[in-house]
Image (cartoon, rainbow, N blue to C red):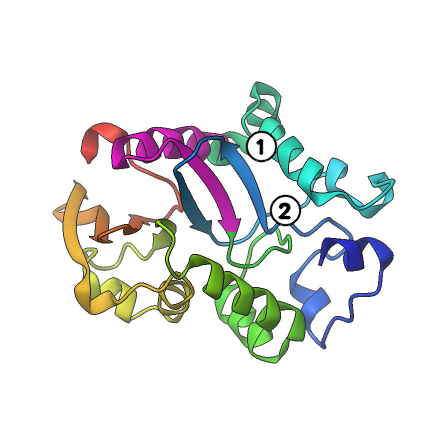
Amino acid sequence: MHQKWFDKTLQYEDGFEEIFQVDYSPEPYFILKNGSNPLFMLLTNPGAGMDFQKHDNFVKSDYRTFARTLGDIYTSEQFKKEGGANAHRRLTKSIKWADHLGYDAIVNIETIPFHSPNLNKSKALEVVGKSWILSRYQEVLRNFLADKPVLIVAACSSKTSISIETIKNSNWLVYQTGLANINVKNLKFKELTKKNGKVSSALLYDNEKHIVLMMGSNNLPSIENI
């Protein structure tokens, strides 16, 4: 995919470029921490594109090297200071979460590898339904994650207390759990934090499949809350 993006041979369906910034490199994955027993953290998409990710700044397509660069940049103090504080906080917390859950490495994987400033998930699912690029990408992703340890990190509504129903009532979360080969019926529930009498973050898990839901933000609570 990255090679075709670099060669400008990817064919985007109607509506694709209205949602996604195709001038910026797609980012299906990057290694956050190396090790022999990785946890695969499934996120939404890479967010708004940055200058170093622009097509004009690539001399060739070498995604493996670029993925290492991403890990270095996203965990840097400079990235934190230049508007990436929330993402930086999530990444540093995720390393501690992986350690706590028994994994010595972590790989970030995007449900959708293309950039967008503020992703409308409903529209994104509509595009997925008619996009060969995304359908093929997610078919490969589904097969890859089938037997892998996964941590989904997702934001959810603050209208009601988080529960198993939060997943069932969200088309996006139903879609993500399908990608990760998670049987929602088997999930166990652990409250992590409460706010105004509502469960505001929670861990749902079944063997090596994990989901962290947090009201209003796709972030992670502190490890002390597990």
Picture residue at 32% right of the left edge, 30% below the top: 99
Q: Position of residue 26 (x, y in %)?
A: 67, 52
Picture residue at 71% right of the left edge, 56% below the top: 21
Label 2 element class: loop
Asked if residue 226 lies in the magenta stretch, the reply is no
Instruction: Check the image and report above or below for 134 versus 157.
Output: below
Picture residue at 70% right of the left edge, 36% below the top: 65
* First in residue order: circle 2 vs circle 1: 2
Q: Nearer the viewer, mark 2 or mark 1?
A: 1
Instruction: For the residues labelled 2 and 1, say whether their Cβ atoms are less than 8 Å apart.
Output: no
Structural distance between the alpha carbons of marks 2 and 1:
16 Å
In the rendered view, does 59 fall on the left or right side of 211? right
Instruction: Check the image and report above or below for 189 versus 138.
Output: above
Nearer to me, 138 or 88: 138
Residue 130 occupies quadrant: bottom right
Say which residue label 2 marks. 48
Q: Position of residue 194 (x, y in %)?
A: 16, 42
In the rendered view, does 134 fall on the left or right side of 146? right
Q: Position of residue 156 (x, y in %)?
A: 33, 56
Name the amino acid type tagged 1.
Answer: Gly
Region in magenta: 88-109
Q: Position of residue 29 (x, y in %)?
A: 57, 47
Q: Given the current orientation, which residue lies at the most extreme bottom position? A: 130
Name the amino acid type tagged 2.
Answer: Ala
Label 1 element class: helix
Q: Quadrant of the N terminus?
A: bottom right
Asked if residue 93 lies in the magenta stretch, the reply is yes
